[in-house]
Amino acid sequence: SDKIRVDFRRTTPEVRKALYRVASRLGIVDPRFDHYRGPQSLGDLKIEAFARIAFPEHPRKIEEPMNWAGKEADSSGPCLPIHPRCEGCLFEAFCPKLRLDFDPAEKGLFPTT
């Protein structure tokens, strides 16, 4: 209805392996230093800051494109753990393609979810 307005500006993205991997490849976090150890960890704060810049009205919207790119269950996402297939990725045009030879989520994400 027009009378109810939900404010999503304080939402935060849920960080999982796929999102962390894509954030690492884009250079948002460095898996050697920006570990994700839950809310308020350095990795969480950097991903949250990026999400607020990308989607200031609803930061959690960053989840869908980043999780899609990093999806590995059926290999439908291009940003695989090792040696990703960058062609067709939503971020291909500006991705610096960092850490292609190892899975950054395995190094910087704890606990794995």
Image (cartoon, rainbow, N blue to C red):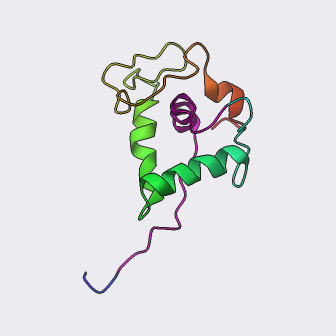
In this picture, residue 67 sits left or right of residue 110: left
Residue 61 % position (x, y): 41, 53
Query: Which image quadrant for residue 109?
Result: top right
Name the residue located 57 percent from the left edge and 53 percent from the top edge. Answer: 49
Name the residue located 70 percent from the left edge and 38 percent from the top edge. Answer: 34
Q: Nearer the viewer, residue 36 or 46?
A: 46
Residue 3 % position (x, y): 29, 87
**If the image is split into quadrants, where does the N terminus sit?**
bottom left
Q: Nearer the viewer, residue 16 or 83?
A: 83
Residue 17 position (above or below residue 46): above
Name the residue located 46 percent from the left edge and 30 percent from the top edge. Answer: 70
Residue 32 position (above or below residue 59): above
Across the whole image, how many numbered discs are drawn on residues? 0
Query: Which image quadrant for residue 86?
Result: top left
In this picture, residue 97 sits left or right of residue 6: right
Residue 7 % position (x, y): 43, 74
Point out the stretch of residues depicted in magenta.
5-30
Q: Main secondary structure of the magenta part?
A: loop
Residue 101 position (above or below residue 26): above
Q: Is residue 19 magenta?
A: yes
Name the residue located 67 percent from the left edge and 43 percent from the top edge. Answer: 43
